[in-house]
Structures are given as C-alpha cells and as structure tokens.
Amino acid sequence: MKIGPIVQQIAVRALVTHARLAAGAGVPLLLALEITGRTGGNVVIEEAMESVVTSVQARRNDRRADRAVSDLPGDGDAHGRRR
C-alpha cells in the first residue's frame, strides 16, 4: 500500500470520528460536518464537506418550497386545470 491511500484513510477516519462526536454531543449534523471539515487541516476534505453541506441545504430548501406550494389553496395547476 502506498502512503497516499494511508493518509487519506487517516484523514477520513478523523473526519468521521470528529463529526460523530460533535453530533453525539448535540451539535446539529450539518454544523458538525461544517466545523469538522474546517478544522481537519485538509483542504480536499474541507472542500468536500462544504460541497456536502451545500448540497443538503439546497435539497432542504427544495423540499420546503415544494411543501409551501402544496399548502397553497386550490387543487389545480398554474392554469387552473384539475390534477
């Protein structure tokens, strides 16, 4: 095994351990991932965690928007047609 994969495994293990400990202490999971990514000392991991957090937040916003639209009165589409 080369040194690169070993270093990568150590970095990922540390990330997972820190995120798990933070979440277990009551820190919201997305915040735990964000903090862990920033404090890990690895730019690649930090960027990956930022990407995960951004992706999850975007999906959460999409679900909220879908719920808000489904809560609107009426049972038709934008053109008044029944669904």
Image: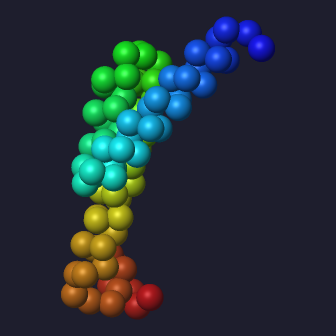
| Residue nearer the viewer, 54 or 71 | 54
- Please report the residue visible at 40 percent of the width from the left and 45 percent of the height from the top: 20
Residue 57 in sight in this render: no
Compared with 34, 40 (above or below) is above
Residue 72 image position (x, y, % from top left)? 22, 81
Residue 29 in sight in this render: yes
- Please report the residue visible at 51 percent of the width from the left and 23 percent of the height from the top: 11
Compared with 8, 69 (above or below) is below
Q: Which quarter of the picture shows residue 67?
A: bottom left
- Judged from this view, the residue extending furthest toward the top is 3
| Residue nearer the viewer, 56 or 43 | 43
Residue 49 image position (x, y, % from top left)? 41, 33
Residue 45 image position (x, y, % from top left)? 45, 24
- Judged from this view, the residue extending furthest toward the left is 73
| Image-based side of 50 in relation to 28, left or right | right
Compared with 72, 37 (above or below) is above
- Please report the residue visible at 22 percent of the width from the left and 87 percent of the height from the top: 73
Q: Which quarter of the picture shows residue 17?
A: top left
- Please report the residue visible at 27 percent of the width from the left and 51 percent of the height from the top: 25
| Residue nearer the viewer, 79 or 60 | 60
Q: Which quarter of the picture shows residue 3?
A: top right
Residue 62 image position (x, y, % from top left)? 35, 59
- Number of numbered callouts drawn: 0
| Image-based side of 2 in relation to 76, left or right | right
| Residue nearer the viewer, 59 or 10 | 10
